[in-house]
Image (cartoon, rainbow, N blue to C red):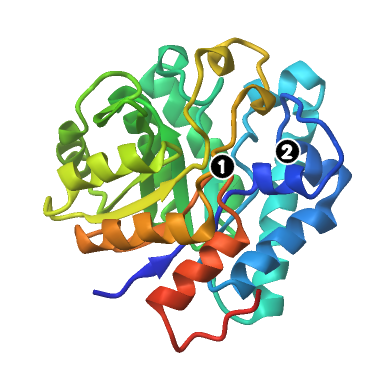
Amino acid sequence: MEITILDGGMGQELLSRSSSRPTGLWSARFLMDAPDLVRSVHADYLAAGADVITTNSYVLHRDRLAPFGVEDQFETLHGVACRLAMEARDAHGSGLIAGSLGPNAGSYRPDLSLPEARAAEVFAEMARLQAPYVDLLLLETMSSIEQARGAVMGAQTAGLPVWLAVTVDDNDGTRLRSGEKISMLPELCKEMTLDTLLVNCSIPEAVTQAVTELTGCGLRIGAYANGFTRITDAFLDPGATVDVLQKRLDMDPETYAGFAADWISRGVGIVGGCCEVGPAHIALMAKQLKPGLNIQT
C-alpha cells in the first residue's frame, strides 16, 4: 500500500518559533505579522518528506476574525495562506497542497455548529476562495455528524477532491467529540460520495482506537494526532487560547513514529501530525516509511 505523508501542525509550530503569546487569532495572526515564517514552516515540512502540505487557513472563518476587527481581511487572508503554500511547494519542486477548512466558532464545540444549510454556505465561500490554488480541500477537526455533513456539502461545490478529518473523544476514540459513534462515518461518506476519511487532533491513543474501528470500511483512512495531554474543559470556554493546553513531554519523534507505524499496520494509508507534531516528527516518519527519500532535517 502506498503511504501518503502529511505535514504536521502549523499553529503551534509558529508559536514555538515566535516570542509572541497566543491569541484567539492563533495561526491567522502570522499571515498578517510574519508571512515569511509561515512559508518557512511549509518549506521545512516539504524538506522533511511531506507529500502534502496544508494551508494556514484553519481559523479563517468570518465569525472567528470578526471579534478581532479583521473580518474585512477574510478574502485577502485566504489568498495569502494559499499563496504562501504555493510558493513553498514551487520552491521545493513537488508536493500537493491541501486547503485547510476548520470548524466555525471553535474547535471541539459541536454544540456551536451551524445548521447544515448555513454551514454549506459558509464552507462553499471558503472553498471557492481556495480552489484556484489548492489540489484538494481538507475539512479538519469536525466534531459531529451534522458539522461534517454541512462542511462537506459546502466544500464539494468547488469541484475538488474533499478529505474529511474528524476529531474523537480523547477518553474514547470510538466516539466523536459529540458523543456519536465513529462507526456512523462510513455511511456518511458513502452518502456524500467521499473516499477519504481521516482522524485528527486527538491524542494518539484515541486515534488508534478510531482507526481500528474504521479500517476495512472501504475508504482510504488517514491519521494525524496531536501532541497535547488532552483537550481540557478550560479550552472549550469562549475566548480561551492554546496556552491552557499542555504539551506532552513523552511525544518525541521516535514515539510518534511508533504510533504512525502501528496505524499503518492497521490499514491506514495517510499519516501526518497535528498540533505539537513538528518537522522532526515528520522527518523521522518519512525516513522510516520511504527510506530512499532525500530527507533534510
Q: Residue at x 38, y 43 (%)?
A: 204
* Residue 166 x %, y %: 36, 37
Q: Residue at x 84, y 42 (%)?
A: 32
* Residue 214 x %, y %: 18, 46
Q: Give above or below for 14 relative to 248.
A: below
Helix, strand or loop for disc 1: loop
Which residue of the protein is positioned furthest toward the bottom in this rendering? 292
Mark positioned earlier in the residue sequence (2 or 1) = 2
Left or right: 291 with respect to 8? left
Work out how far the residue at label 2 is from the one at label 1, CA to CA, in angstroms: 26 Å
Residue pointed to by mark 2: 28
Residue 73, label in figure: none
51 or 229: nearer the eye? 229
Residue 96 visible in the shown view: no
Which residue of the protein is positioned furthest toward the front in this rendering? 250
Left or right: 27 with respect to 172? right
The answer to which image quadrant residue 203 occupies is: top left
Amino acid carrying mark 2 in the image? Ala
Amino acid carrying mark 1 in the image? Leu
* Residue 2 x %, y %: 30, 75
